[in-house]
Amino acid sequence: MGKSNIIEIKEKIESYLRAGNLKKASKEIKSAEKKFLDEPYLIFYKGMINWNSKQYEDAIANFKECLKSALLEEGQGIYAEFKKGQVYYYMGLCYDMLGNTEEAIIQIKKALHEEPTNFEYQEMLDELQAEL
């Protein structure tokens, strides 16, 4: 399977997620997992499905697994544009929803480290710090 196939799959899953069709996104991920091992985009999207389903602990596990992917470490091809900050951000949101504000702040700070000019991340960090 070439990179172009994962790009097509990635785009299809993203469109399902934007439309709120978690069932189709999940089905597409399960099908793609048979072809692509340790694919960070698929792992991230599983986390997003769990986030949208309010399965925050499962989402955190997916996001952690995504960040451990060897493909992300290489940072080449389509992985050069992968935004780790987004993974940390959603992990922080999950921790916040679970009532763990301290860990949420840690994750949002990591997101800001990856993407220092992201206003949304800074705004969330400010809100979380105000809660303490």
Image (cartoon, helix red, strand yellow):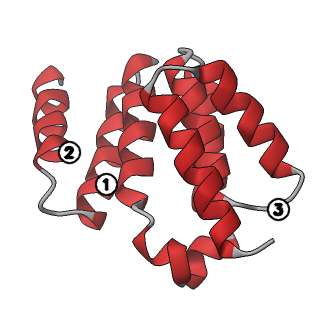
- At 13% across and 45% down in the image, what residue appears? 122
Query: Which residue in the structure is indicated by mark 1?
Result: 111
Q: Residues within 10 Å of mark 2 (few under 14, many from 20)?
A: many
Say if mark 2 contacts mark 1, CB within 8 Å. yes
Query: Which residue in the structure is indicated by mark 3?
Result: 37
Image height check: is 13 above or below 74?
A: above
Query: Which residue in the structure is indicated by mark 2?
Result: 121
* Quarter holding residue 129: top left
* Quarter holding residue 125: top left
Q: Residues within 10 Å of mark 3 (few under 14, many from 20)?
A: few
Image height check: is 74 above or below 35?
A: below
Q: Nearer the viewer, residue 94 or 72?
A: 72
Query: Residue 37: percent from the left, percent from the top?
Result: 82, 62
Inspect the image, locate mark 3, and give the three-letter code of the amino acid beneath it.
Answer: Leu
Inspect the image, locate mark 1, and give the three-letter code of the amino acid beneath it.
Answer: Ala
Query: Residue 45: percent from the left, percent from the top?
Result: 58, 41
Image height check: is 4 above or below 41?
A: below
User: Which type of secondary structure does the marked residue at label 3 adopt?
Assistant: loop
Inspect the image, locate mark 2, and give the three-letter code of the amino acid beneath it.
Answer: Tyr
